[in-house]
Amino acid sequence: LGMSLFGGSSMERLSADDTDYIPYFRAGAYVRILVPNDAQLQTARVLSVNLSSPEPYELEHWMSREIEHVAVAEDRNPSEFEEIAGALNQTMIVGLAPRVGFDSFFFACLTVFQLLTASDIGDVMYPAMRGSGTLSGAYFVGLIVIGNFMLFNLFVAIIITGFSETKAAILKEERENQAMIEQDKLRKAQSIARGASLRNKSIDRKSSIASSTVEAAKGFFGRVRARLFSSNKVTPDDITKAASAGEDAKTDVDEENWHDLPWMRKSVENRYFTGFIICVIVISCVSLILQRPSMPKMEADLLAQVTVAVNFIFLTECFWKIFTYGWWKYIKSRWNQLDFFLVVTSLIDMAVEWAAPSGSDAEWIRFFRTFRIFRALRPLRVISRAKGLKIVLGTVTRAIVPVMNTVAIALAVFFVFGIMAVQLLGGRTSYCTDIHVFYKEECVGVDPHTGTTRLWRARQLTYGWIGNAMLSMFVLASQDNWEIAMYAGVDATGKDTGPYANNNPVLALYFIAFMIIGSFFVIQLFVGVFIDTFQTVTSEVKALSRQSSIRSEQSSGSEMGMQEPLNKLRLYVFDVVDKKQFDLIIAAFIITNVFTMSCESYKSSAGQANFLTTVDYIFNFVFGSEVVFKLWALYPKQYFSSRWNKFDFVVVMVSFLGIAIDNVGADLALNPTILRVLRIVRIFRILRAFRIFKAAQGLQNLVRTLLRSLNAVGNLAALLLLLFFVVGVLTVELYGNLCTDDFEPYLPDGRMNRCSLLQDEDLLDYHASFKDLGMALLTLFRISTSDNWSEIMDACTLEPDGRPSGGDAIEKVKELIEQYRATGKMQYLSQARIELPVCQTAGELSALEDFVSCEYPDLQSGTCPTTCGNNLVSSTLFSFFLCASSFILLNLVMAVLMQELQNAIAVSSKSKSSLSVLMSVSAATNKWLKMADSETVDSAVAPSEDSAEPGLPAKEATADGDGDKDAKKEAKKAEPKAASSPIKLQPGSGSPVKIGSPLNGARGANSPR
């Protein structure tokens, strides 16, 4: 379908990047061309590019295989093809065939597979829409919804279900095997006991006389010894002490400390003391929030004093608890171990700050200053004082241990595919910065088109050794731009040659196989196993959540019962607003209002604005009338007892307030700034769309599920936020000084910025940096969504490479910087970057302080911080954070929400099924009783053929039917009694008779039944 819709028509601009910011318009790429006098778009492949030639592009036509040299390559829109084709006298390149397209069945399958992973959808959709029109976007929307949202998640559900069934079968088999083993042991024990009893029967007879004599002697001497040597008696206190010796965790040391230092013990366990420590932890967290490289000197000094005070309080708490509980009892707790570790590292950090001379940057000082990163762990002390967080963390920790088998499987898969990647792609994915240079030995000198020095660089994901290969496999498994790595492998040629587009398309099957096994299966299996284990550990909590769901369902159902008013007019209005048709009419108004609000646009015309204003007044009148009618029919107390009615009232009042602000503000000539602030109220009109939930029971169930799951999700969300905060503080401390791509080349003092010595590809995006905690949290949130997180990690793993000039590198860099500042030619700066490749250490920047500076020097040493990161630390930190945040905690939140929704659906279906059975039984019973009553009335009012029944008034026997009416009235009065009395059939007839009443014949033939 994609080939028939977009084959040969989708088109990308010539300046489009391929992978790792490498231009795709190079040798091997496919391009769109126009030939003279033919407006039909055609496709050709670029065989070679020689920019020094007058016809630099050598093309091979897709269909005819004709080779042609082309001189003109310009981006053109499809609307210009008719005009251009008529004026052409030679072939012209008008655009690129997208790398991910539908020109052949093989590449169409690759493109569809990429769309199923929801990776870089825009790179496929927008070129197709450019060539085929905007409506072609419906193809991609349908493919994503059906393929990714439905089939892919169904695949994941099947994996999790299969694991659960296999786990249950294994557990059942283990229980059966254990039962068989126990039975075998029991049979062996019984047989051994029978044999021993037969052998010992004769021996027991012989020794019974001797043993009785010995026991009697022991008893006699024991009583004599007790009378002579025992002076103390066993008291009830001794029994109490013996019983409570191992009763709880309170040991003898606890009892001794409690008696020796009772006021210290009481003060430590006092809730006010705990609250004070929590306040100090909060102050410490605030100081960590304010920590950043760009701090002013005064703020840094103030935060240093706060840090000293906080460390002193934590040290006092630590010693207080040690004196209270004793060292071994104190250090036995894991939370106390964390507290003690943080206190010790804080003391080391303070000692280094006080002992180190001002401006010193010795190696041992830099080593001990690394202890300050442990300050980021201070917020973890809140967990030990928050019961909910403590329970959730303990549950997650217990769930991690059983998942280790799945982790071993994942590592094995990464290892196997990593070895294959080293064999297939090791050292073959490098390229020259001048993309038209193919051989490594030619990648020297200056690029004549850009003026920069040519460099032979490696790609973002490398496969040089098994460690890098396994890390690349993990990045691919997280589905982070995996297609970029795939096409980089497809283009790979050799270790000393650059990429050639579409050189080996079959290699794409290797990456597809890994995505199916490593990402779709292994990663989802890890997530599924962790969720299943977590739910197993928290089975009791889930049982409580089911009870709360049932109670909340009952309470929500009780809100729907409204009492009818006594006033006739109110009752009439109540009957109107309580009908389902009324709700459907209001729902239609709500949907129409949503569509009209979507018609608003920036700088709309006067007619459009007047129309929308008039329609808005109409809808406000309708919704306001609904509120007034319901308030009058239900009375305010009963109206506001429903949460939905409260929501309706707030939305309507906000709408009226917005109208009042628009009209009164213009008349009173308010300040435009104040008027713009007040008009923010109009934004809340969009809340009208949520009123549709009232008319849809399924949406109401979703809302109730969200509200019920807030308690369960709250602790998980708090743990997730704590993880973000701790890692955010840690990344600000580690990577806050890394360079971003928005740096100023020169500083106010005239010196060059240290970031100018880095290649553009090694700079952090200024939208994804760690310069302060706010930006760090946003960057971490991006990482948790697996959105290009490997690029961020790659910028933080820079380590200095070998210096070509050795010890003379600094002097050469100084000369090159002087020449660059004098001439402004980029080739001198590029050569300086080659002398200090990848990144620069703090010592090198200190040696270049006369030429290079930074915006925010280190406050302790006064020197510029390094532009390097740490490969091992960065890879470990970001991989751990992605697993903990995206694969575990976020999926646990989704699992809790899904479990709550299943509980709500189960409760709803159970109540509906029982209600339907009850209603069917009630309907059948009412029908039966009506038939019985009709027979009773007919026999009671019908006179005999001979004469009227004696004893009845003459009015009942009249021929005008009045007697029938009176009899029916009497029957209706007696109907509740008949319905409440037990009924059974009379033998021999179908007439019901009250239990305990005489049969028909006992009262005469003509007596009423």
Image (cartoon, rainbow, N blue to C red):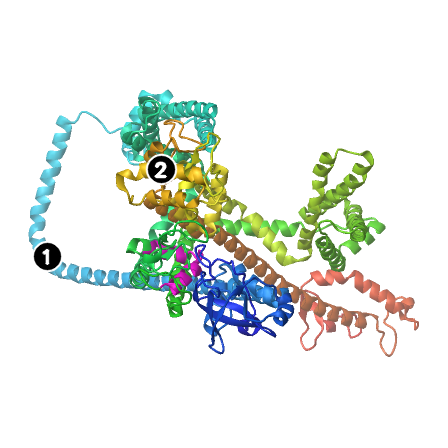
Q: Which residue is mark 1?
A: 200
- 523 sits to left or right of 218: right
- Near mark 1 (Cα within 10 A), the count class, few <14, some 14-19 or many ≥20, is few
With respect to residue 318, does 166 lie above or below? below
Q: Nearer the viewer, mark 2 or mark 1?
A: 2
Q: Quadrant of residue 390?
A: top left
Query: In which quadrant will I find the C terminus?
Result: bottom right
Q: Is residue 282 above or below residue 800?
A: above
Picture coordinates of residue 74, whole percent (x, y): 55, 62
Residue 234 in the image: x percent, y percent?
A: 24, 29
Mark 2–mark 1 Cα distance, whole angstroms, equals: 104 Å
Residue at 30% in and 63% down: 420
Q: Quadrant of the N terminus?
A: bottom right
Q: Residue 958, how many percent across, how many down?
A: 92, 71
Q: Is residue 478 magenta?
A: yes
988 over 794 or under it: above or below? below
Q: Secondary structure at mark 1?
A: helix
**Can the viewer see residue 529 in this picture?**
no
* Outermost residue to the front: 54
Q: Nearer the viewer, residue 428 or 897?
A: 428
Report the span colored magenta. 469-492
Provide residue 400's location: percent of width, then percent of height: 36, 50
Which residue is label 2 attached to? Answer: 815
Which kind of residue does numbered mark 2 sit on? Answer: Glu
Residue depicted at x 47% and y 37%: 773
